Image (cartoon, rainbow, N blue to C red):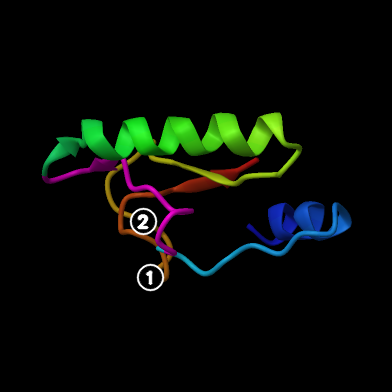
Amino acid sequence: MKYAKAQIEKKGYKISDYFVSGQTFQVYREQTGVNLTELAKGLSYLKYALSNGIPVIVGVDDAPGSPSKKTDNNTDILSL
């Protein structure tokens, strides 16, 4: 996450805090699975941001739980 933030800052952007409405979309939870509404919103935002040169960070879940208490308790890896 530290490196992702540094890359975004080089482009003149700063990331929002976790769970900012309209910019953060939790499309999966271990307890409930995929939320198709959030998935559609997230894909729409990704397409908008990337087509306008706005960098994004995407959280990835590859194991149960999360190593960080500041995240959604699902995300393991954060990448651009």
Magenta portion: prevailing SS class: loop
- Report whether 5 appears left or right of 27: right
Residue ID at (38%, 48%): 25
| Residue 35 in which image quadrant | top left
Amino acid carrying mark 1 in the image: Lys
| Image quadrant where one finds the C terminus | top right
- Report whether 9 appears left or right of 74: right
Q: Secondary structure at mark 2?
A: loop
Indicate whether residue 25 is drawn in magenta.
yes
| Residue 20 in which image quadrant | bottom left
* Residues under numbered marks 2 and 1 in contact, where contact means CB atoms less than 8 Å apart: yes
* Circle on res. 66: 2
Q: CA distance from mark 2 to mark 1?
A: 7 Å
Residue ID at (33%, 33%): 39
Please count the marks in the image.
2
Indicate whether residue 74 is drawn in magenta.
no
Residue at mark 1 = 69
Neighbour class for label 1 at 10 Å: few (<14), some, many (≥20)?
few
Residue ID at (59%, 46%): 57
> Which is nearer the eye, 38 or 18?
38
